[in-house]
Amino acid sequence: MTEMIKNPILPGFHPDPCIVRAGDDYYIATSTFQWFPGVEIYHSRDLAHWQFVGRPLDEKRLLDMTGVPDSGGVWAPCLTYDDGMFYLVYSNMKAYRNYHKDVDNFLTVSKSIHGPWSDPVFLNSSGFDPSMFHDDDGKKYVLNQLWDHRDKEHSFDGIVLQEYDAENRCMKGSPVQIFKGSEIGLTEGPHLYKIDGKYYLFCAEGGTFYSHAVTVARSEKIEGPYEISPYNPLLTSYGHPGLRLQKCGHGSLVMTQEKEWYLVHLCARPNGNGGRCMLGRETAIQKLRMTEDGWFVIDHASGLPQEEVEAPALEGDYAEEKKVRYVFPERLPDKFQNLRIPLGRNYLDFNKSKKSVILYGKESMESLHTQSLIGIRREHFDFLAETKIDFRPVNYQQSAGMALYYDTTNYFYLSITWEEEKGRMLSLQACDHGVIQNAGKIYGLPKEPHSIWMRMIVKNSKAQFYWSGDGDSFFPVGEILDATQLSDDYYDEKKHGLRFTGTFIVLCCQDTSGQRCPAEFEYLVYEPEVGAL
């Protein structure tokens, strides 16, 4: 019986996938935006089962996102492999919400997917979604979307191509515009392939929301002209609201050892929540076939994205992750990230005997610079998360706890803090487009022991926070909250600008007095598919 691949293959916030095969190994790289380290990489041997490999942009020399806005940072990386070397092209988007896109594009290389990665080479700043193409004559090229800041209504100015000089580690010649896009418009996310002597250009179009699509064009020459496929778009879910996989677009092509074709692509699942996709933009896969006239189409009678896809005849298997209890033996577990820059020992440390992590209070939840905050992705519609925290504030500028976090303007935060006359207390804050409201307070926390337990239970669109003094009996804090606000789709583009990330479960500590009050977290439990709130 043929094995079926279940979509999405990378659930939760894993957008803009780029896939590459190196021998019998497949790798996918996805965007990380303002989360550090940058670029998520996963490995598979069969395209069905994927295992986390690492995040290569793990040093400030490779990626400095100090001050980048929410949903800035690393957009749409490109991972390629040529002659025993991995090439990773990536961006650092520093401003994007108005007329300009202030973005720098870089290249780093490594002989191993595990590194070390070379010092980055600056490529250009003319647009986003950079990628690299290795031609069979040995030449290398960089492609990217070209941004026209003069006209906000027509700012997507097609795809440009420029040769890269690998020996001298610099760009060569001048950029050439090779593709203006199809009638769908908003052309971005270019990936170029050479197949049977022809150049095939895959692009994302329609914008990364519900009108998203994958467009394919081809040419006899690398600089064009490019002819748009008569079957365009290759992939979209636009106009099919009944599909569970929505926002399908931004695709990357791979050929198996048996010369089967697959496309990994971005998708999202609203799951009946008024179009709000709380798990963010995810990664799915589709099987393709080539028509007699040499064009790609979806290998399914409907031509639409499928939740289950026929797998290739390859071997590979990884254990499915269920309930996980994360502890901290002198390092953060692989699943964890923080915001924008690496956290040094001034803000993050470990208790070796207890296998706990200590966060020293730094800037507020609004900061775009240094936050003492670590977290993992929400990857399931239903889950429970729990931690045990020891925090002893002495003034109201100090707080620490657990949050369900989208970005600096939207989150739910249960914290231990301090009030005059009341002393140590619990506070539940709901931040909605930057406006913080009190969602619940608990006074009279026990003086001994100092540690308390925090828990959140999320059932699709509903989130409830709890606390406990003994780890056995848990009591709700505040009312049930609407978790749909923690999504890209909650933002009004004209009022708030676009957002592109996903929800995290975070542990954090703030001390705006500058005294670096410490919070110790013994563990973080993440358990999917839980019961009632």
Image (spheres, rainbow, N blue to C red):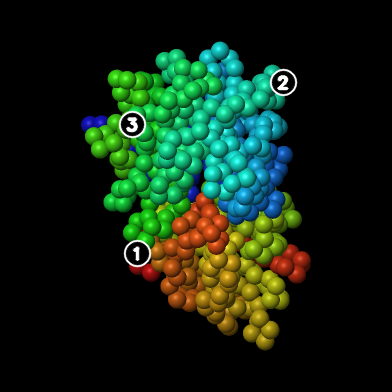
Q: Quadrant of residue 304?
A: top left
Is the Cβ of the residue at disc 3 closer than 8 Å to that at disc 1?
no
Residue 300 position within the rendered picture, expressed as x and y whole percent measured from the top left: 26, 34
Looking at the image, is mark 2 or mark 3 nearer the viewer?
Answer: 3
In the rendered view, tell whether residue 522 sits above or below residue 222: below
First in sequence: mark 2 vs mark 1: 2
Is the Cβ of the residue at disc 2 closer than 8 Å to that at disc 1?
no
Residue found at the far top of this picture: 137
The answer, for residue 184, to whether it is visible in the render is: yes
User: Residue drawn 67% across and 34% down?
Assistant: 124
The circle drawn on residue 168 is 2
Mark 1 burial class by Cα count in 10 Å: few <14, some 14-19, many 20+ = few
User: Residue drawn 56% across and 18% down?
Assistant: 83
Q: Tell me if 252 is positioned left or right of 172 in this view.
A: left
Residue ID for mark 1 = 531
Q: Tell me if 513 is positioned left or right of 502 in this view.
A: right
What amino acid type should be assigned to the residue bearing mark 2?
A: Asn
User: Residue drawn 43% across and 68% down?
Assistant: 482
Determine the secondary structure under disc 3: loop
Residue ID for mark 3 = 231
In the rendered view, tell whether residue 144 sits above or below residue 266: above
The circle drawn on residue 280 is none
What amino acid type should be assigned to the residue bearing mark 3?
A: Tyr
